[in-house]
Amino acid sequence: MNIVVVGCGFGGVEVVRTLRKEAKELDITMIDRKPQFDYQPAYPELLSGKVTPEEISCDLKKFATKIGAGFIHAEVVNIDFKAKKVKLKANAEDEGRDIPYDFLVIAIGAEQTFFGIPGAEKLSHTVNTLNDTIATKNALDKLDHSKESSIAVIGAGLTGVEVAGELVDYFKDRGALARIYLVELMPRILPALPKENVAIYVSKFLSDSGVEILTETAVQEVSEGEITFKDGRKLPYDIIIWTAGIKPNSLLEILAVPKVKGWLKVDFYLRVEGMDDVFAVGDTVYFEREGVRAGQNVEEAEGQGRVAAVNIVRTIKGEKLKRYRPKNTIQNPRALISLGDGKAVVYFGGMVFRVFAYRLKKFVEHRYMKRF
């Protein structure tokens, strides 16, 4: 029985780990277009130098070997659900091939979106992948630190807030001057968190650190050295870091699967709707149960990964499947947010906790990476 897992982020890795615990005899094949797993929540701290790429990444082939799975470093270009084959793109190592499966797990994640804003994708840096983040750090290092720099962070969600905090530390550590702008379309930062208390605290912390927060501010166009907002204002910049929004993985555009607003639709057992042998987990998934929608975050990706793996084994054994129950939801989210300067906040149950929050964040990071 061959299980193929496409995408080896948090969700995909958790599927594989749980499958191996539940059934030693299964053949498991992992496929990813990257050769390494990256601890994505730590990307902002790459900018300030608090972590290195080596500390937050690991070789997927070594991990696969350790748990008795196979690993293929390749890009998936299509999936033939009738023939039960995953089609790989040709690369330097092979001419492209089909990988057969008995059960398939789609865990391909999401991608950065620029909302079609002219110039945004071409002229912005991001922290969406490890390579993107390294490129952003290199751009910061190339600035003339004898002059005041202007850095615009577009999008004040969790990632944007963390990036702004790390930028403060980056320039402080170098004794350099910078005007750091955090730009948000909505009336307040952290708009995905329903309670205002955390936004109020984080806004004050960042403002006191020198970050200029621009809310209710929409980007209309990005040109060389200047951002134009929809209200006519213009903002000169040296570097733009885009953290505003995600979109479904581009692979989903060519797959004949049920979708909701472009996201992959799954049933209560995390099977792609209408399929008994294809499961999906993580940011690529649209999961809703009794009016509650799963968030697109690490906690949900891991939780879905565990349940999907259990349900694959139960399907093989002819046992009753387990319904997935989301925990970190759109309606009731929770988050661990780094703010720079060795500070963080925990948002849980609508309340904000600050004591030991940064230590907790680093503990979670180190504990997770130990498994590799």
Image (cartoon, grey):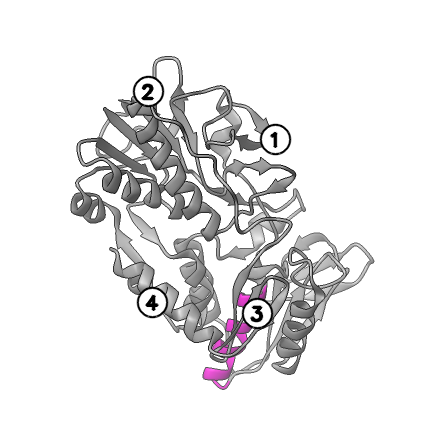
> Camera-side residue: 241 or 122?
241
The picture places residue 302, in percent across and down from the top left corner, at 41, 47
Give the amino acid at mark 2: Lys
Task: Kindly report the distance in space between the C-alpha atoms of the residues bearing marks 4 and 2.
Answer: 37 Å
Check whether the beta carbons of the residues at disc 3 and disc 2 lie within 8 A of each other. no
Quadrant location, the N terminus: top left
User: Mark 2 falls on what kind of element?
Assistant: strand
**Of callouts 4 and 2, the N-terminal one:** 4
- Residue behind mark 2: 85
Quadrant location, the C terminus: bottom left
Residue at 37 percent across and 64 percent down: it is 365
**Residue span colored magenta:** 161-175
Give the amino acid at mark 4: Thr
The picture places residue 271, in percent across and down from the top left corner, at 45, 28
Residue at 37 percent across and 32 percent down: it is 311
User: Mark 3 falls on what kind of element?
Assistant: helix
Give the amino acid at mark 1: Val
The picture places residue 64, in percent across and down from the top left corner, at 21, 43
- Residue behind mark 4: 52
Give the amino acid at mark 3: Ala
**Of callouts 4 and 1, the N-terminal one:** 4
User: Mark 1 falls on what kind of element?
Assistant: strand
Q: Nearer the viewer, mark 3 or mark 2?
A: 2
Q: Nearer the viewer, mark 2 or mark 1?
A: 1
